[in-house]
Image (spheres, rainbow, N blue to C red):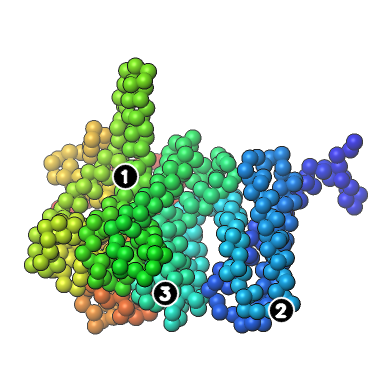
Amino acid sequence: MRQEFEFFGRYIPIRKVKHAFEYLLDFLIGLLSFISFGIFVYQLGYASSKGFSFNLLLLFNSSLILLGLGILIRLYLNQKLTKGVWIYLDLVIGLLFILSALINWEAFGNFTDEAQVLSEKFFLINILIIFIFIQTLGKLSLQVNKLKLSPSLVFILSFILLILIGSLLLSLPRATVHGITWIDALFTSTSAVCVTGLIVLDTSKDFTHFGQIILMTLFQIGGLGMMTLTTFFGFFFQGSLSIKNSLFLKDYISETNIGKISSTLIKIVLFTFLVEAIAAVLIFIFSDASLFKSFGDRVFFSAFHAISAFCNAGFSTLTGGLYEPGFRLLYSMHLVVAITIILGGIGFPVFINYYEYLTHLFKGVFRKIFYKENYRHSSQIANLNSRLVVYTTIILLLVGFGCYWLFEQENTLAGLSTYGKFVTAFFGSVTTRTAGFNTVDMSILSVPTILIFLILMWIGASPGSTGGGMKTSTFAIAVLNTWSMATGRKRLEVFSREISSETLNKSFAVISLSFLVIGLGVFFIMIFNPELEILDVAFEVFSAFSTVGLSLGITGFLTTSSKLTLIIIMFLGRVGTLTILMAVTRKIAEPHYKYPEGNVLIT
């Protein structure tokens, strides 16, 4: 039998026809999932008129029917490739989409306000719409490498896209109580995506519950990284990553071993959700039930602050932050938030490194106990990056704690118990490292404390983490290199390893660019808001660049030009100025010649 299909006199292999049909079907399912999800979100965030809602519901139901049929047809064509639970799941989803649309179609004869919002009638359908949308988005992210763009440029564009989508969602009428201007929506979206925490509106009073969920989603995606999260879902639904996907993803998750890309990706996402879940439970336990209107409010508060803490976002549903009356004395809860911030800011490469060591240790001890095998020590407990990051983090925490304890005895620590002083000083040292929560009145901090905060904010979190800033490893390399040169050493050696010249050059470039951006930021804001104090402006710019979110109270008084300046600074601080330069500049080939060396007077 001839396996060809005749088309206007041309014979095309049936295999190619089937492949083209499957490709078209996947495209239509993806398009319909985006349409259904878009209408679902729009109905949640927009109070539309009756006539318009009728047309919207007609489009929504039609999309659901076509989406359900598409899923069932795809399942039939790929039934040999689809295995296990996915067969039944796709079958149930397809049938439910068709059934729910047909049931809701009956509302057309007697149109009521209840018919306009399917989200309030079929909660399960809403979940399935989100599920299909995430599935489509995940599979789509696996095709990004076909755009022939550099990973750095894709990383930058993903943040820009997420910021724009976030600003549109925050502009929906039901996202805010009294509406929001375009510049405030863009500022808030940038602050959330870049996990900064600077706000021009009160998150508690000016944003509705729907708006707060949007903010929580934005800083969750922004903390993990859009490409990391979407690729994880793509891998989850597809079951594997191609070599091209792995090569493209390795720069995002700081994994050099291609064979470990998939497992590292899973560990990062699971570690994130596990820490956030544990933190949410502990925050719920240590919070006071009398401070909330309902059990649901307490649960949402716990989840919101757990995610905000791990992502180093600094957003809070309290008007005064954690300094809000009733919450300012919940020191155990403050301690949980502080530890969550540290875990989010320590960096995923450090977590992966110590996870592998602990796994090796557990297996070795287990085999020694049950199989009487000699324990084999790991050749290297922690790599150079992990040790440098951990030591630097501990030193910075101790220095920040000591300085806060010393300079704030007569200010924010006055009248507190010993335990309260300890937690407040520790929290103050932690939160400046890109977190942005406040447990004290920032306006009464002493000048020495503010100056120490500036340094800690400038340093920021660790590489490969949810935080921003110059990074702990960059600061450590700069300090060690200065000491090495002062002692007359020609090479920088740390933990029996020699630091490469490329690392030294990158550290110098990052430090120089950070000073340039911060300096220009202070300069422009002082021009746009000349009435502000320079120390307040410097604090604001340092906070924006390092994605901290702490403020001395001037954010709400900034002009539109100053807000745009801070938006750019927040974006540069999160993405990285060096990353942007490497993405947009043209690579120059290394020349095959070398000029004679020359010396320039430095000191």
Which of discs 1 and 3 lies nearer the camera? The answer is 3
Left or right, 161 with reference to 457: right
Residue named by callout 2: 110
Provide residue 385's location: percent of width, then percent of height: 30, 41
Image quadrant in which you'd find residue 324: bottom left
Could you say which is closer to the camera, residue 531 or residue 198?
198
Look at label 2 and name its amino acid. Answer: Asn
The quadrant of the picture occupied by the N terminus is top right
In the foreground, 82 or 372 = 372
Q: In the structure shown, which secondary structural element does the residue marked by tag 2 occupy?
A: loop
Residue 207's label in the rendered image is: 3
Indicate the quadrant where residue 408 lies: bottom left
Seen in the picture, residue 581 relative to 372 is either above or below; the reply is: below
Q: Residue at x 48, y 63 (%)?
A: 162
The three-letter amino acid code for the residue at tag 1 is Thr
Q: Nearer the viewer, residue 319 or 353?
A: 319
- Residue drawn at point x = 23 percent, y = 62 percent: 330
Q: Are marks 3 and 2 in contact (CB under 8 Å)?
A: no
